[in-house]
Image: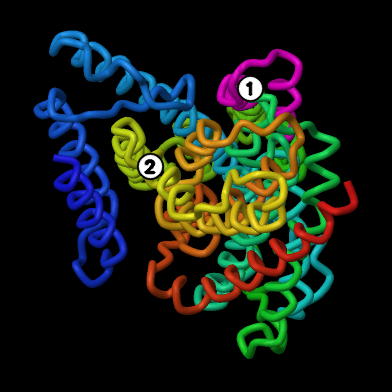
Amino acid sequence: MDALIILIFAMGYLAITLEHSLKIDKLIPALVMMALMWALISLGIDAFPNWFDSAEHTLMENFGLLDHVQKIDLMEETLLHHLGKTSEILVFLLGAMTIVEIIDYFDGFSTIKDFVHTKSKRKILWVFSLLAFFLSAIIDNLTATIVLISILQKVVKDREVRLWYAGLIIIAANAGGAWSPIGDVTTTMLWIGKKVTTSHLLGYLFVPSFLCMAVPSLIASFLPVFKGDLEFDDTEEKKKSRFSGTMLYLGLGAIVFVPVFKMITHLPPYVGMMLSLGVVAIFAEIYSSSKFSMTEYDSEESDAAAHHSPVHHSLSRIELPSILFFLGILMAVAALESLGILFNFAESLQQHMPLLGTETHYAYEAHTVSDIVILLLGVGSAIIDNVPLVAATLGMFHEPIDNELWHFVAYSAGTGGSMLIIGSAAGVVAMGMEKINFFWYLKKISWLALIGFLVGAAAFMVTRTLF
């Protein structure tokens, strides 16, 4: 039964990668494989030898001793647990996307053009890369990607060029998320799990993460696609809303407020995002109603403002296919995690690396082997998902807080996902927003992400000797 579930995942994964060849939207195989995998788990629950306890990050010892009813109850609890964790991400994503669309409703992103004083493709590449790197550390890599690609769509009109920028934004956002405790889901997991502290995370990972972003951007800046200047279409210049600047700063400020709210209240980020959305929506409704007056009621703009709430309008523009794709792929990976397949995969790396965990006189060799294991986990995060793999490492390793191993796990899991478009939340949302082809990304961007990943890993192996 395990083999059949893995086969369904592999076939679904293949269908997602061949989306453009099959002419089937990626959300369809994602939802189908998710439903089939959980259906097979339910039907064959008594045949499975293992069950992964997501709360304790370890395999259950007494799963085989449970009767059928207890196993079904456990499966339902686990399914609800994963649905809850996935829903947190989806609700957060809906809130962030709606705020971005409200900003766009007031043409707020056009304000960014006033700050872009260059048409050089190379300079604009560095502007977006640096913004993605630092912004993702503050508001997390997922939200930073949404905001920057929304801005990118206003600045770069040529879609082929824009895809290249989007690819580099993914790399930079994932790199920036790795050195901040709130920049990526996996670093947050390690932080909350008392495996890393903020000061040591910054000390260990800032330089490797920066190089992971800077090296691909430097190489890309010499590619033909980034030579010359961008062509800004000034003929389409339309009158901006007088509230465009206000809504831009209000919206971005509301998003930045989310991690602050989380640190103060210790509530999940989606709660703060809903508060931010509510505040932005209040001002949007107030500013929208001031667009028209009784004396101008017959004008086209007044009629539109009177009959279309900016919040309703923004919600209608949300990329629901991307949301459903997220649901399918995350719940499918959760099925693999629940059966202990991912944990067994991570543990098998240890078993095939006999030096790992040896005595002190083999410490150097053991250190090298553990590095290889974590690097392979980073590569694995590009294929599957970094969250369950990090959950598996929490059960595999028992090093104390701020041990260099945990920081290397944070780096590898956070940045390794950039090597494939569906290997990270930032990549998936960019794929939905820009309709990026899996194989286009594999051919054009993956090699840059791999170089950045390896350079950053090498830098980490040097910087960790300083602590």
Q: Main secondary structure of the magenta part?
A: helix
Question: Is residue 283 in view from this perspective?
Answer: yes
**In terms of secondary structure, where does tag 2 sit?**
helix
Residue 111 lies, in percent from the top left, at 74, 54
> What residue lies at 50% left-to-right and 51% top-to-bottom?
424
Q: Earlier in the sequence, mark 1 or mark 2?
A: 1
**In terms of secondary structure, where does tag 1 sit?**
helix
Reading the image, the residue beneath label 2 is 342
**Quarter-wise, where is residue 232 in the image?**
bottom right
From the image, which quarter does the N terminus lie in?
A: top left
**Quarter-wise, where is residue 418 in the image?**
bottom right
Residue 176 lies, in percent from the top left, at 71, 51
Magenta-tinted stretch = 256-277
Question: Is residue 244 in view from this perspective?
Answer: no
Reading the image, the residue beneath label 1 is 272
Verify whether residue 270 appears in magenta.
yes
Amino acid at the residue labelled 2: Leu
Q: Residue furthest left?
A: 43
> What residue lies at 63% left-to-right and 42% top-to-bottom?
103
In this picture, residue 39 sits left or right of residue 124: left
> What residue lies at 63% left-to-right and 56% top-to-bottom?
371
Residue 108 lies, in percent from the top left, at 68, 48
Q: Foreground residue, 387 or 436?
A: 387
Taking 150 as reference, is 309 above or below it? above
Q: Foreground residue, 17 or 106?
A: 17
